[in-house]
Amino acid sequence: MARVTTATLLGEMTDLSGLATKPDPFYTTCQFSSYDRRSVAPDKPGWFANGDNANTTDRRHYIRDEKVGNRVEHVLADMRGPGALVRFWSANPWVGEGGKLRVYLDDDPTPVIEADLMELVNGKARIPEPFTSRAAGGAGNVYFPIPFAQSCKVTHDADWRGFYYQVNFRRYVSSADVESFAPNHLTEHADVIREVGARLADPMNLVVEALDGHEIDVTVSPGSRGDAVILDGPAAIGTITLRVSAPDPRAALRQTLLQVYFDASPTPQIESPLGDFFGAGPGVCPYQSLPFVVEPDGTMHCRLVMPFAHSARVHIANFGKQTVTVTGGVVRTPHTWSAQSMHLRAKWRVTHGAVGSPDGYDMTYLILHGSGVWVGTALMIMNPTDIPTPGGGWWGEGDEKVYVDGESFPSTFGTGSEDYFGYSWSSPDLFQGPLIGQPRCDGPGNRGFTSNYRWHILDALPFAKSLEFLMELQTHVPTPGITYARIGYCYTTPGARDDHPQIHAAMLRIEDPPAWIVRAAGAAQNSTVLEAEDLARSGIEADVQHDARWSNVAQVGWDGTPGDVLSLSLPIEEAGKYRVILCLTTRPGGGTCRIALSGNAVDHAFDLSHPSLTMTREVDAGIHDLAAGDAELSLICQVAGAIGIDYVRLARAQ
């Protein structure tokens, strides 16, 4: 049995090949969080209760309070036995200014970590970036191993309200030999920390030991299937790189399946639309993470290691109506198959026409029987809301629930879908990191397609007998017509089985959001919406462009050159202070513009470029004192490129 230390756990953070063997020593992973304690059982009232913060007016969603000298410490987590703290997340690390987060090990009254939470998540409390990060919505994430031999307790002593948190632990078997973390380990292992941090920050530099490479160049006609590559073992697939060529690449990435069969399995261990397998979709959604990278030109890389004892067959199946060519290659790497080896399993499923509800219900990602390790999750959702703001148009109030080895209550119970993916407050902002990210959110707000991913490396989820991964679908307001596509990634031993439904052509359709008109509800309530195409225009000549992604199926746009000015006349019915919000379009070839209102410039430039996606964003032009009559809104091109405005929203300011 291997000894567990701070250094060995750091090494695991970028050792993708290590995920493919059973953990030694074995552990399970659990989570302490501020989930609503009214959730007690699936058949009891409150199972979908949504007051997921640690301290509300009438209840406390943490473990207990302890008096330590003159202060009261709120105990967020308390783990007994050998283990390791592997993840900390908070939606609002700024809450409780002046308070301290403390980590106590092995019943020692002196904490090994004592830090202001904002300093900790900003990388200013000795644990550096990228082990710490701030994600969309201001959420704080810490992925850094804190092993312990006997116990771990996490506290915070702030006087807070509405604090959200998650703390994830490995719980090792009782016989595990674990060296407890000490503050001097940050200095002692400084070289390892720098090396691992560099790999996390630039995942394309991961070194792969290659036996040989195998080119992929296969063309599949509609309704046909073909082998892309067949490999002999024992060995492993170290990397897969693919690129799809077709008249309609977006449709091809969803309607062409990747199927991988290991060791003559009659059913594929991997079955997913090609684009979705790489963690984002539909279409090309570029991002960089540790195990997956998607480049803006559509080249997709997977570095999850795929061992096999005898054979591996990479199969392409075309369920679409166009001929598709798939090119790329596979790198075969050494692997000695043993009783500890596992096959990669990645299974995609979709629910079309789901009805989002504030009451919530559970969506199944994958149910597994056998032993293995869960290593990742990706979600590709289409939200047809007509509310243009996260408040009111949000799809992700639902919590993740993970049941391990037949437990009656999930050992991982979350506080919201975006919290699971590492961000907060239903933020539409794009972000990417080695382990968590949101590479796509079409907008405005949370409308349209959104892609989220989370890779479980340090916080992998091993199971000896079974695992059930569920996530609630819970929306702010009733929302029919949601498409909820998801994929779970895990390693399993031979003989494992799952509840994966057979994929057929109807499942692979892309349901785009329907034509819509902005609804002034949710956080947009009491707003006046002015469609840009209805406003009087002056200055540079601009076109009315039509597409269902824009409100009222239209926006005003032009290909700008620096200095171009487009002015729109805003009818102000009643004088007063208004927050002026513009909905602008980002896209390939987008330019940069500035905004002026009645001659007063807004001190911000808006970059409207994206390498491959067309998205819309509400941008805040500030609060202005507007007289009754017409106010002039000007868009001034700063960097050449396409500039488009969908609508203006005027919200009364206090």
Image: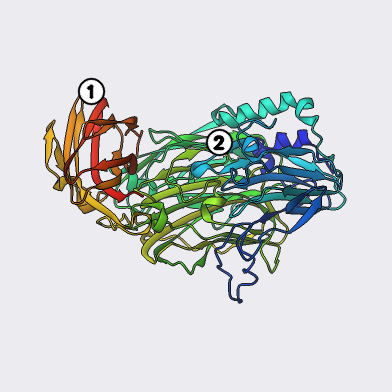
Please indicate whether residue 28 sits to the left or right of residue 319 in the image: right
The amino acid pointed to by label 2 is Thr
Q: Earlier in the sequence, mark 2 or mark 1?
A: 2
Residue 204, percent from left and from top: 54, 29
Q: Is residue 596 visible?
A: yes
Residue 6, percent from left and from top: 77, 36
Instruction: In the rendered structure, find residue 354 and report the number of the disc placed on it.
Output: none
Please indicate whether residue 579 sits to the left or right of residue 288 in the image: left
Question: Callout 2 environment at 10 Å: few (<14), some (14 to 19), or many (20+)?
Answer: many
Nearer-the-camera pick, 652 or 347:
652
The quadrant of the rendering that contains the N terminus is top right
Residue 113, percent from left and from top: 75, 38
Nearer-the-camera pick, 644 or 343:
644
Helix, strand or loop at mark 2:
strand
Helix, strand or loop at mark 1:
loop
Please indicate whether residue 584 sits to the left or right of residue 478 in the image: left
Residue at x-position 31% and y-position 51%: 652
Q: Is residue 211 visible?
A: no
**Residue 565 position (above or below residue 26):** above
Task: Single out the mark in the foreground, 2 or 1.
Answer: 1
Q: Which residue is mark 2?
A: 239
Nearer-the-camera pick, 6 or 261:
6
Residue 502, percent from left and from top: 47, 62
The residues tagged by marks 2 and 1 sit, at their Cα atoms, a distance apart of: 44 Å
Question: Callout 1 environment at 10 Å: few (<14), some (14 to 19), or many (20+)?
Answer: some
Residue at x-position 11% and y-position 35%: 538
Q: Which residue is mark 1?
A: 562
Nearer-the-camera pick, 515 or 224:
515
